[in-house]
Image (cartoon, rainbow, N blue to C red):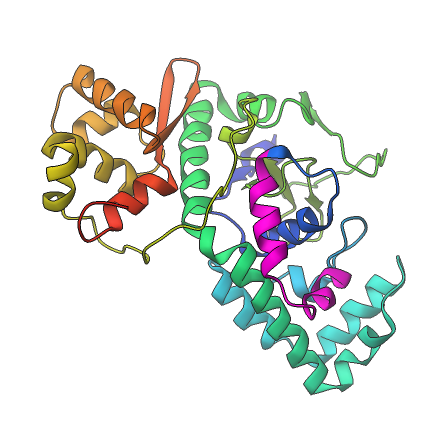
Amino acid sequence: MEDLARTRVADGPAPCIELSTAARQLQERTQPVRLGAWRHRTLSALQPASRMVLALMPSRGRITDFLSGANAATPAELIEQIRATPRSRVRASLENTARHQPLPSWARRLPDDPLLLRQLCDSLEHVAGHALVPHWREVEALTAADAAVRSRQLLGGGVEALLARVNPRRVRWRAPVLEIATVSGLDADVHLAGQGMLLQPSVFAVEAPIVNLDAVPQPVLTYPVARLQEGAATPLFPALPSGGHRESPPAVGAVGSLLGHTRAAVLGAVANHPGCSTRQLAALVGISMASASEHATTLRNAGLIATHRDRQTAAHVATPTGIAVLDAPSGRP
């Protein structure tokens, strides 16, 4: 019971997990169809030095700890933390990886070669800059929408209901045991000893759960965000987004002339409150639920928002096109 009480859902994406699994997806020959356009575009943009990163983030096997264990809120923070990794940790991490799988010969020089280590970090920043950074806002939006779905599951049925529905294809709750189907097919019993578990939604870790029993302060289990479990192979990141990051709510004026004042307000509310339900959307804009539902349907049909349905509840999130409409000075993408 103590493990159940301490099990929680992460409140945002984990850059270290998204970057490492994105690197793996770039190397997979049988990657999901929904990532096809992203993979082709990213691989075309990567420089040859990127092979250094991919060698330490292979499609199968372990990812070298010092490249994946940082605790950061954004890709930029992750790269900064990796650059600041003490040489002693780099050495210990590489030695640990070498006990389980072969390493490139050059990797063994990293702890004692500052120039080589800097080159690796520069290459990592380059990979992140093409594979992850341009799409980070959508990753955050998809994760926020998932958090809304999981919160409702938790409120509706408790932690056990959440565990039963978080990833039905790969994770099964048979009280008091959580069964996890991993890529390796590992068959072992793990006792959490009261630590509980952090459930980490992910956009790129879609094929199989990642389990990190050594994570601090508690073990981590990844699962695909709710939208990716709906069965539809809607492409993710089909094109590079335009515009910069918006820190404040968008002005409705310019967009209103294109969509109409109320519909523009609905789009802005969804963008600034990803994962909101139709009831919440109505309250945010100050309109009836029927009107909010009608506007959401129109925006969804236009490709400006996406909606995930969990039983009788809808969770709305802006698409890259919707965000581009809001960000464009003229109200046009």
Residue 116 in the magenta stretch? The answer is no
Disc count in the image? 0
Rendered view: 81 above or below 65 = below
Q: Give percent across and percent down for residue 152.
A: 41, 25
Q: What residue do we see at 22% from left, 53% from top?
A: 248
Rendered view: 206 above or below 20 = above
Q: Give percent across and percent down for residue 104.
A: 85, 69
Q: Give percent across and percent down for residue 140.
A: 43, 46
Rendered view: 175 above or below 56 = above
Residue 49 in the magenta stretch? The answer is yes
> What kind of secondary structure does the magenta stretch mostly adopt?
helix
| Front residue of this view, candidates 8 and 329 | 329
Residue 110 picture quarter: bottom right
Rendered view: 211 above or below 149 = below
Residue 164 picture quarter: top right
Residue 71 in view in this figure: no
Instruction: Work out which residue is located at the far front of the displayed protein and give it.
Output: 44
Please state the extent of the stretch shown in magenta in the rendering.
34-56
Residue 129 in view in this figure: yes
Q: Give percent across and percent down for residue 130.
A: 54, 59
Q: What residue do we see at 42% from left, 30% from top?
A: 151
Q: What residue do we see at 54% from left, 34% from top?
A: 5
| Front residue of this view, candidates 232 and 13 | 232
Q: Is residue 36 left or right of residue 27?
A: left
Q: Quadrant of the N terminus?
A: top right
Q: What residue do we see at 63% from left, 70% from top?
A: 123
Q: Is residue 304 left or right of residue 225?
A: left
